[in-house]
């Protein structure tokens, strides 16, 4: 994936960046919605609306899970809420600066080749994975921006060893700290980026770094020690990553499915949670066509650029890709399900590959350009589907809470089997009642069924794989004459029909 084009003039480079930033801003305005928060977003939002920093920290300690390992994003969101407000769309727009920073990172990497840079931006702006997490009040755009800046640093060093200057050292140190402070799971990417730079620069790279840029190196090391100490402390108090299943080859395949932008063309995530492979029925054709586009693009470039030698470029990218293997292996050995979003720092590698394939074919004639155009069209359709198709709607906590509030106002008793933090954000219960509930709003699980009196009025049940894994709640409701009365995305609201109804 070498850059063989002559460097673009600085004025053109800056113009290309400006156009890319304007296109990214348009994408942000289209991709970010005001729909209801779902579980993970509700947890972020609940911490953001705390009036004081002390309250924010107490909310972190109360939740006491792996969200404690997202310190940089959650404090950033808390500050953002104090400036701009707490609405769903507003909190999701906190991702906008990081998405624009990702564009800047791609410009740093590919600015000397305008064709390569333009395709990198097109593949970013049409990637369904990027659209999905751009529309989430979660840390993945922050993680992506740090990973892209880090990739830009090592890619520039690979392209031109003379880049090893003070600007490069501060870019590398800042990007590595940004990435690692976002999430503990990002640490392998920073380590392997350092390894890739070491491989490119030679065996004396660490000593050169210390000797030539001692301040940048000292800040990098001291920052990593502070971040690492915080993560170790969070693990010691039990804020670990939830297992949620196991990891195997299917997880790796699903990660590729998401990162390469297939998700918008396939079934809803909630359907896949319940039906697994059966959820893909009816989507095979569109997924096969898009997959064929990727396959043909790769085959055409391989036929044109095939190199039998295992050269240094291949080794460089294998080092950068190694965290995917390491995280998957760790998930397999420790019984933790690795979700595609944990691999967000791999997206710059996907975009690097895609831009290489597209720029190579674009210089190869009319038919090859048509293939690239079709691939980008398929990616854009997938992105638009992930944003606008009803099947991809988020869990509708807002509607469920609205019905529950109305029922409470009418004197009903509510049994809430769903996320508590999102209910707190939407005002169903007060912060002081988050552990106990209230006489009218009971926070319950399957183990509490024996305490449910016959006269209970409304049951609010969300994702059954989380809140009713054994099926005991649904069996209890059916056996006692309850029926689903209303349904929203990821929710069933159960009532007893009126007498004679």
Image: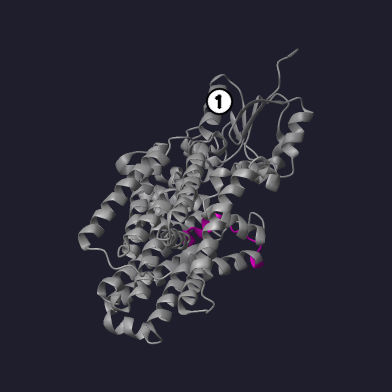
* 19 or 296: nearer the viewer: 296
Residue farthest to the top? 500
* 164 or 397: nearer the viewer: 164
- Kindly identify which residue carries mark 1: 403
Placement of 135 over or under 190, stated as above or below: above
In percent of width and height, residue 55 lies at: 40, 47
Magenta segment includes 345: yes
In percent of width and height, residue 21 lies at: 30, 50
Secondary structure at numbered mark 1: helix
- Looking at the rendered image, the quarter that the C terminus falls into is top right
Q: Which residue sits at x=45%, y=46%?
A: 131
Q: Which residues are magenta?
A: 333-347
In percent of width and height, residue 266 lies at: 59, 44
Dominant secondary structure of the residues highlighted in magenta in the image: helix
Residue farthest to the right? 479
Task: Bin the neighbour count of mark 1 within 10 Å (Cα to Cα): few under 14, some 14-19, many 20 and up.
Answer: some
* 273 or 346: nearer the viewer: 346
Placement of 296 over or under 27, stated as above or below: below
135 displayed left or right of 250:
left
The image quadrant of residue 348 is bottom left
- Looking at the rendered image, the quarter that the N terminus falls into is bottom left
């Amino acid at each position: 994936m070498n850059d063989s084009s002559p460097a673009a003039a600085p004025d053109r480079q800056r113009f290309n960046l400006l156009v890319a930033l304007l296109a990214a801003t348009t994408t942000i305005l289209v991709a970010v919605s005001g729909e209801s928060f779902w579980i993970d977003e509700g947890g972020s939002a609940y911490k953001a609306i705390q009036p004081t920093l002390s309250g924010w920290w107490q909310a972190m300690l109360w939740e006491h899970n792996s969200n404690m390992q997202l310190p940089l994003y959650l404090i950033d969101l808390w500050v953002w809420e104090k400036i701009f407000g707490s609405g769903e769309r507003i909190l999701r727009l906190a991702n906008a600066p990081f998405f624009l920073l990702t564009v800047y990172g791609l410009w740093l990497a590919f600015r000397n080749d305008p064709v390569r840079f333009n395709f990198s931006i097109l593949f970013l702006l049409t990637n369904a994975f990027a659209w999905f997490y751009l529309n989430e009040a979660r840390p993945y755009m922050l993680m992506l921006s740090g990973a892209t800046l880090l990739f830009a640093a090592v890619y520039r060093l690979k392209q031109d060893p003379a880049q090893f200057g003070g600007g490069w050292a501060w870019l590398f140190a800042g990007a590595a700290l940004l990435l690692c402070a976002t999430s503990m799971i990002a640490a392998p990417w920073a380590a392997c980026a350092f390894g890739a730079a070491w491989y490119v620069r030679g065996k004396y790279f660490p000593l050169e770094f210390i000797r030539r840029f001692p301040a940048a190196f000292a800040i990098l090391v001291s920052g990593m020690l502070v971040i690492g100490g915080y993560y170790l402390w969070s693990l010691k108090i039990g804020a670990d990553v939830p297992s949620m299943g196991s990891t195997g080859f299917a997880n790796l395949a699903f990660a590729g499915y998401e990162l390469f932008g297939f998700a918008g063309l396939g079934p809803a995530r909630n359907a896949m949670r319940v039906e697994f492979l059966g959820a893909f029925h009816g989507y095979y054709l569109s997924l096969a066509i898009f997959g064929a586009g990727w396959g043909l693009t790769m085959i055409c470039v391989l036929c044109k650029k095939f190199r039998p030698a295992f050269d240094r470029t291949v080794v460089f990218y294998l080092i950068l890709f190694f965290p995917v293997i390491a995280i998957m292996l760790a998930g397999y050995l420790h019984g933790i399900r690795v979700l595609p979003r944990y691999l967000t720092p791999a997206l710059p590698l996907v975009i690097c590959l895609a831009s290489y394939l597209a720029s190579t074919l674009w210089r190869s004639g009319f038919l090859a350009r048509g293939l690239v155009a079709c691939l980008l069209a398929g990616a854009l359709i997938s992105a638009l589907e992930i944003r606008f198709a009803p099947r991809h709607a988020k869990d509708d906590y807002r509607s469920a809470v609205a019905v529950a509030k109305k029922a409470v106002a009418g004197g009903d008793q509510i049994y809430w089997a769903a996320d508590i933090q999102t209910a707190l954000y939407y005002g169903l219960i007060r912060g002081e009642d988050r552990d106990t509930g209230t006489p009218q709003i009971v926070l319950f699980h399957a183990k509490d069924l024996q305490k449910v009196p016959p006269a209970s009025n409304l049951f609010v049940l969300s994702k059954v794989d989380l809140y009713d894994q054994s099926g005991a709640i649904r069996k209890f409701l059916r056996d006692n004459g309850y029926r689903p009365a209303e349904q929203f995305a990821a929710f069933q609201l159960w009532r007893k029909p009126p007498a004679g109804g």
